[in-house]
Image (spheres, helix red, strand yellow):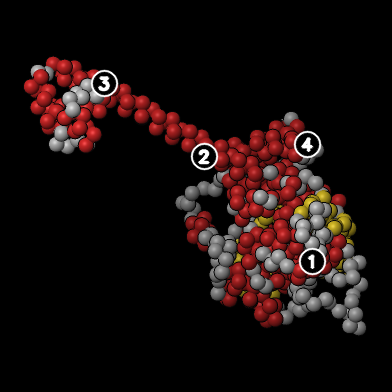
């Protein structure tokens, strides 16, 4: 069985997929399947995305920029590459748990993840996607987040360093023994190993039909995991999705409408809202868009009630982080960063305080084997899913063993009671006269099995089956 098939059999889809957090907030791909053109109708040298955001450290609005350049003959990434990127991240996690940047695979394993048909057309699409992702250079200015939760002033990286795609040659009786492979760029892979990834429900992601829906799904899935209610300036939200070509409010709403409707149809993702609830006008040309995780409307209403149940103790996340550092390297003085707090709060929200504390030692144990050079709490994010699954399996086995032991104890008590019961009535039986015993045997023949009846007719009174039947009849008369 392949690694993909095993993962699909053992893991829920909402835990199987992975996404890289620094590759979510700025689109690496254009939203249309056609290549972008410059004012002369040719391919542009670069694509620039810029978003103005308030910097808490600098206490002022600063531009955050991503510049994309490509060396691929196929041009810039399109929505196709968004799909392949998520599949490659998920495949890496399944294959080696993000322990190695080079990943070997069979083409069909990627096709299964992305729900592509197994044919030559899919091979061709995959070849183009890998070439585009390998030829892409990304330059982040004030937009690549660091381990400390700040932004690099300038950071340049690729996505894939290299790849090899093996194809089935028509007419051959066997597949090529040499596997396909790809290798992550060192900068991106280092960010992945620092734990800057999150889970992604790949079944939901790959079921979406529109590029805008998939782009919006990744962006909202990240931000709704931090807060069940998400609000943002409408033009800024559109820019994060790659809709920066217009600032016309009506056109932005129109472009978003089909994607929003598709996301509202996903069970448990976002609550359906009316247009007046979804879009709120704050002033001339100033609009805000909001989303809320499904099932949180009642919770938020209750949270406004001063008599409602108080929230979880705010130090639970800090305790989890400090417990990690003490268990990992003996550091008892570590002060959690903002990003570490967010990661720990996400874990506690997903698994609960008590379960997170119980599973942490298993996470540390797995990291000592698979990632001994890890330095930060963020690296644990790669191992929680497997540790929780193993913990659940141990809990299930313990419950089964407990139930089995209880059943065995009950069975043993029943046997002892039956033994005492039979001893009592055997003593009474031995005290009966021959006539009384014959009378009981005759009564037994009216209700017993044919075998017991035959034994009695043949005079086999000492047969165990006959004795059991007679003692049972005696016990019935004694009630």
Check disc 4 and report the residue beneath it.
372
Position of the C terminus by quadrant: top left
Task: Give the CA distance from mark 2 to mark 4.
Answer: 29 Å
N-term-proximal mark, 3 vs 1: 1
**Residue 206, visible in the rendered structure:** yes
N-term-proximal mark, 4 vs 1: 1
Any mark on residue 420, and which? 3
For the residue pair 212 and 66, the one nearer the viewer reads as 212
The 10 Å Cα crowd at callout 4, few under 14, some 14 to 19, many 20 or more, is few
Check disc 2 and report the residue beneath it.
396
Task: Give the CA distance from mark 4 to mark 3.
Answer: 61 Å
For the residue pair 453 and 469, the one nearer the viewer reads as 453
Furthest residue toward front: 458
Percent coordinates x, y for residue 38 in the rendering:
88, 79
Percent coordinates x, y for residue 344 in the rendering:
66, 45
Residue 158 found in image quarter: bottom right
Check disc 1 and report the residue beneath it.
170
């Amino acid at each position: 069985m392949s690694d993909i098939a095993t993962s699909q059999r053992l893991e829920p889809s909402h835990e199987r997929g992975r996404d890289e957090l620094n590759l979510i907030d700025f689109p690496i791909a254009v939203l249309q399947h056609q290549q972008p053109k410059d004012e002369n109708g040719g391919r542009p040298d670069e694509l620039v995305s810029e978003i103005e955001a308030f910097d808490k450290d600098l206490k002022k609005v600063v531009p955050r920029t991503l510049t994309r350049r490509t060396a691929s003959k196929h041009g810039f990434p399109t929505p196709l590459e968004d799909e392949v990127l998520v599949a490659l991240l998920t495949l890496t996690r399944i294959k080696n748990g993000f322990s190695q940047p080079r990943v070997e695979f069979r083409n069909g394993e990627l096709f299964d993840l992305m729900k592509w048909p197994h044919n030559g057309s899919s091979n061709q699409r995959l070849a183009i996607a890998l070439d585009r992702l390998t030829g892409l250079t990304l330059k982040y200015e004030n937009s690549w987040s660091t381990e400390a939760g700040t932004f690099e002033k300038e950071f340049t990286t690729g996505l894939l360093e290299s790849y090899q795609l093996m194809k089935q040659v028509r007419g051959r009786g066997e597949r090529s023994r040499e596997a396909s492979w790809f290798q992550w760029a060192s900068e991106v892979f280092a960010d992945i190993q620092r734990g800057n990834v999150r889970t992604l429900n790949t079944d939901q992601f790959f079921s979406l039909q529109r590029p805008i829906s998939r782009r919006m799904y990744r962006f909202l899935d990240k931000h709704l995991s931090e807060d069940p209610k998400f609000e943002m300036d409408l033009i800024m939200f559109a820019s994060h999705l790659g809709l920066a070509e217009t600032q016309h409010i009506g056109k932005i709403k129109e472009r978003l409408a089909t994607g929003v409707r598709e996301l509202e149809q996903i069970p448990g993702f976002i609550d359906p809202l009316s247009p007046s609830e979804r879009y709120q006008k704050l002033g001339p040309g100033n609009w805000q868009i909001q989303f809320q995780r499904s099932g949180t409307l009642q919770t938020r209403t209750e949270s406004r009630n001063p008599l409602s149940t108080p929230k979880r103790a705010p130090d639970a996340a800090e305790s989890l982080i400090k417990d990690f550092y003490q268990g990992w390297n003996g550091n008892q003085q570590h002060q959690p960063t903002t990003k570490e707090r967010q990661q720990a709060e996400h874990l506690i929200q997903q698994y609960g305080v008590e379960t997170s504390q119980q599973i942490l030692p298993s996470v540390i144990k797995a990291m000592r084997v698979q990632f001994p050079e890890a330095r930060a709490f963020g690296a644990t994010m790669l191992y929680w899913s497997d540790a929780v699954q193993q913990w659940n399996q141990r809990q299930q086995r313990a419950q089964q063993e407990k139930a089995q032991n209880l059943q065995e104890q009950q069975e043993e008590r029943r046997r002892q009671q039956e033994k005492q019961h039979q001893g009592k009535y055997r003593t009474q039986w031995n005290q009966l006269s021959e006539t009384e015993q014959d009378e009981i045997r005759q009564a037994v023949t009216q209700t017993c099995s044919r075998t017991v009846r035959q034994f009695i007719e043949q005079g086999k009174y000492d047969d165990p089956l006959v004795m059991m039947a007679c003692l049972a009849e005696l016990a019935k008369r004694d009630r």
